[in-house]
Amino acid sequence: MSEVIVVTSGKGGVGKTTTTANVGTGLAMMHKKVVLIDTDIGLRNLDVVMGLENRIVYNLVDVVEGYCRMKQALIMDKRYDNLFLLPSAQTRDKTAVSPEQMKKLTDELREEFDYILLDCPAGIEQGFKNAIAGADRALIVTTPEVAAIRDADRIIGLLEANEIRKIDLVINRIRMDLVKRGDMMTNDDVIEILAVSLIGAVPDDENIVIAANQGEPLVGNDTLAGQAYMNIVRRVMGEEVPFLDLDSGSGFFARLLKRFGMK
Amino acid sequence: MSVFDLFRKKNSGSIAKDRLKLLLVSDRASCSPEIMEAIKNDIIQVISKYMEIDAEGLDIQITQTECEGSEGKVPALFANIPIKDIRK
C-alpha cells in the first residue's frame, strides 16, 4: 500500500527540502519506489538539492494543466532508478494549482509508487493547503528554536483540523555543545511542548552543507547526519530504531583520548 | 562573583522553553473561527435538548483564568447562553 507523506514546518529555512531529499533517497535505497514532489511553485529548490536541475523539461503545473503526461514530467534520479522527482514550476505562482488538483495528482501517483513525498513551501497559505491536500501523514521539521517551534505548533493544529492524524516530528540542526551547556532546548523539551511523537533527531552537521553543494543527499553514509536520516527512513517504514547518540564526538572515551593526547 | 550573577543562573535553553510555553497558550487559545463556530453549534444542540435557548444571542470565547493547583493562568472556554424558557 502506498503512502503520501507531506514534509512541512511553517517556518522557512529549517530543513524541509533537505529532509525530503534525504528521506526520499533513503526510502529508494531500501528498494521502495519513491516520487518526490516539489510543491513550492515559483521557488523550486528540491531539484538542486537532488542535483537534477539540468534535467527538467516539464513540471507539476504542466501535468496539472494537461500540457504533458505524468511520465514525461517525472525525472529519474542519477543514482537510483526507483526514485523520481516531479519538479515545481519556476515561472508560475501558487494559485496555478488547487488542492483538488493536487489530491487527484497524488491519487494518480499512488498506483505507481510506494511512497509519495511532498516538499511543502513555508507558510500556511495556498501552497501549504495544496501540499497537504492528498497527504496521509506528515513529517514536521523544526529546529530547537522558539520561532520554529511556535510555527510547528500552528502547523500541527492546521494538520489536525484537516484530519491528518499521523504526525511525526523531526528535530533538525541540533547542536549538542549548546544543549549540554543548557543553551539549546533538549529533544525532550521540544516533544513536551509540541506533544507529538519524535521520528528523528538530526545534528547540525557541516556535511549537510557539503552534500547540498554537491547536489547529492547524504542519507546512509557514515556521517552522523547521514545515519540520523537513515534512521528516520527506517522509522517511516515502521521499524523501531533507537535514537543515535549525537554526542559521540565528545563522549567519555573521546575526552579521555583527548586528555592523553591520542586524538 | 557579583550578586547579579545569582540572577543569571538560568541558562537560555530553559528561558526559551518557558517563553514558548506561555506563547503557545495564547496561540492555541485563539482557535480558528471554523472551530469556534463548530463548538458553538454543538453547544446549542446539546443545551437545546433540555431547555429553550436564544441561539442568536449565544456567545462563546476563549479567555484566560486563574486555576487552583497550577501557576499562572490557564485557558478557559466561556459561554454566555441566554435561556428563553427553562422548561422545554
Image (cartoon, coloured by chain):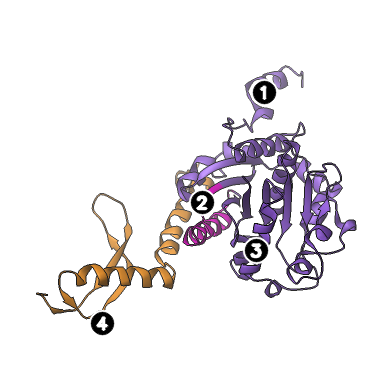
Of tags 2 and 3, the one toward the viewer is 3
Label 4 crowd (10 A; few <14 / some 14-19 / many >=20): few
- Residue A100 percent across, percent down from the top left: 61, 68
User: Please, what secondary structure does the residue beneath circle 1 have?
Assistant: helix
User: Residue flagged by tag 1: what amino acid is it?
Assistant: Arg
Work out whether mark 1 precedes mark 3 in sequence or the reverse, and give the earlier one.
3
Residue B11 visible in the shown view: no
Reading the image, the residue beneath label 4 is B57
Left or right, A191 with respect to B59, comes to: right
Left or right, A167 with respect to A90, comes to: left
User: Residue flagged by tag 4: what amino acid is it?
Assistant: Gly
Left or right, A184 with respect to A72, comes to: left
Quarter placement of the N terminus of chain A: top right
Asked whether the residues under the numbered discs 2 and 3 touch, taking CB atoms below 8 Å apart as contact, a structural biologist would say no
Mark 1 on the same chain as mark 3 = yes
Closer to the camera in the image, A32 or A236: A32
The chain to which mark 1 is attached is A
Residues in magenta, as a range: A144-168
Left or right, A213 with respect to A202, comes to: right
Residue B78 visible in the shown view: yes
Residue A157 lies within the magenta run: yes
The chain to which mark 2 is attached is B
Mark 4 on the same chain as mark 1 = no
Of tags 1 and 3, the one toward the viewer is 3
User: Residue sitting at 42 percent across and 73 percent down?
Assistant: B33
C-alpha span from label 4 to label 1: 69 Å
- Residue B45 percent across, percent down from the top left: 26, 70
Label 3 crowd (10 A; few <14 / some 14-19 / many >=20): few
User: What label sits on residue A255 in the rendered view?
Assistant: 1
Reading the image, the residue beneath label 3 is A104
Quarter placement of the C terminus of chain A: top right
